[in-house]
Amino acid sequence: MIHSLGELSKDFRLYHDIIGCLVGALEAKDIYTRGHSMRVGDMSYQLAKTIGLKGEELEIIHIAAHLHDIGKIGVPDKILNKEGKLTASEWKAVKRHPEIGSNILNCSDELKKISKLVLHHHERWDGKGYPYGLREKNIPLGSRIIAICDSIDSMTSDRPYRRAVSWEMCRQEIEANKRKQFDPFLVEATKELWNYWKKEFFYK
Ligand SMILES: [Fe+2]
Ligand SMILES: [Fe+2]
């Protein structure tokens, strides 16, 4: 775990444990992504901190990042765990997970800020993402942070249909997608963290 729990306030440590349980419920179903949500949460926390965010804004991004894929609970298991290529209608079902997740989380005013970040975690800087095709700074900052950490962890993890790429290749890929998929300012900010992440997650 990239942040020490000691850094978090006492109340927040309890939330953090409960979030870990919710994510465990998702990962019991989506067997190929074990550990992914917790790593993306902790990487996003670190990236948000690196660009100077703190207090409530930092904690909201941290929680949203841990919960970013919670909507996959609403996607049928046989699609999530399918080893072959997905059909067009199966892709459509997978692409509904940000909205499902955001609806799950939209149950109180307090949780609305988290729900919004989850809703937009698959938007792209160039507007070609989903569900709304938002562009650039119209995408909430927290969602842009989650998007880049999600991609780094996915690329450097094995999936049933492909092997993990090396950290060096992943780094080149993120750089190549600056201003396409990712916020260029955030791509620059990851430079400080790259060696640390590689060391922390190399043996995942
Ligand atoms: Fe965390
Ligand atoms: Fe996702």
Image (cartoon, rainbow, N blue to C red):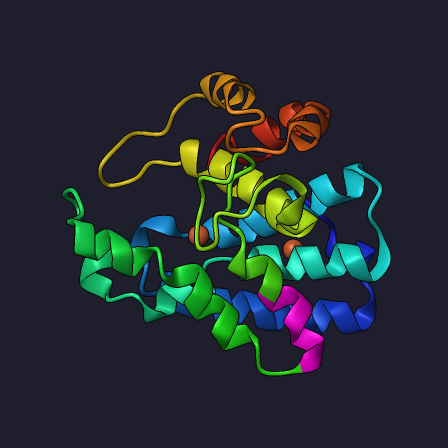
Ligand 1 rendered quadrant:
bottom right
Left or right relative to 188: residue 37: left
User: Which residue is found at the position 18% from the left and 56% from the top?
Assistant: 89
Image spot of residue 41 (x, y percent) = 60, 52
Left or right relative to 93: residue 166: right
Of 133 and 108, the residue lying toward us: 133
Q: Is residue 1 visible?
A: no
Q: Which residues are magenta?
A: 109-115
User: Which residue is found at the position 60% from the left and 34% from the top?
Assistant: 200
Image spot of residue 149 (x, y percent) = 56, 40
Q: Quadrant of residue 99?
A: bottom left
Magenta span main SS: helix
Total marks drawn? 0
Q: Is residue 98 visible?
A: yes
Q: Is residue 110 magenta?
A: yes
Left or right relative to 64: residue 95: left
Image spot of residue 144 (x, y percent) = 61, 44
Q: Is residue 14 above or below residue 86?
A: below
Q: Is residue 160 magenta?
A: no
Of 20 and 78, the residue lying toward us: 78
Q: Residue furthest bottom?
A: 108
Q: Is residue 203 above or below residue 80?
A: above
Image spot of residue 17 (x, y percent) = 62, 69
Q: Is residue 167 above or below residue 20?
A: above
Q: Is residue 6 above or below residue 126?
A: below
User: Which residue is found at the position 84% from the left and 52% from the top?
Assistant: 54
Of 30 and 200, the residue lying toward us: 30
Of 199 and 45, the residue lying toward us: 45
User: Which residue is found at the position 58% from the left and 82% from the top?
Assistant: 107
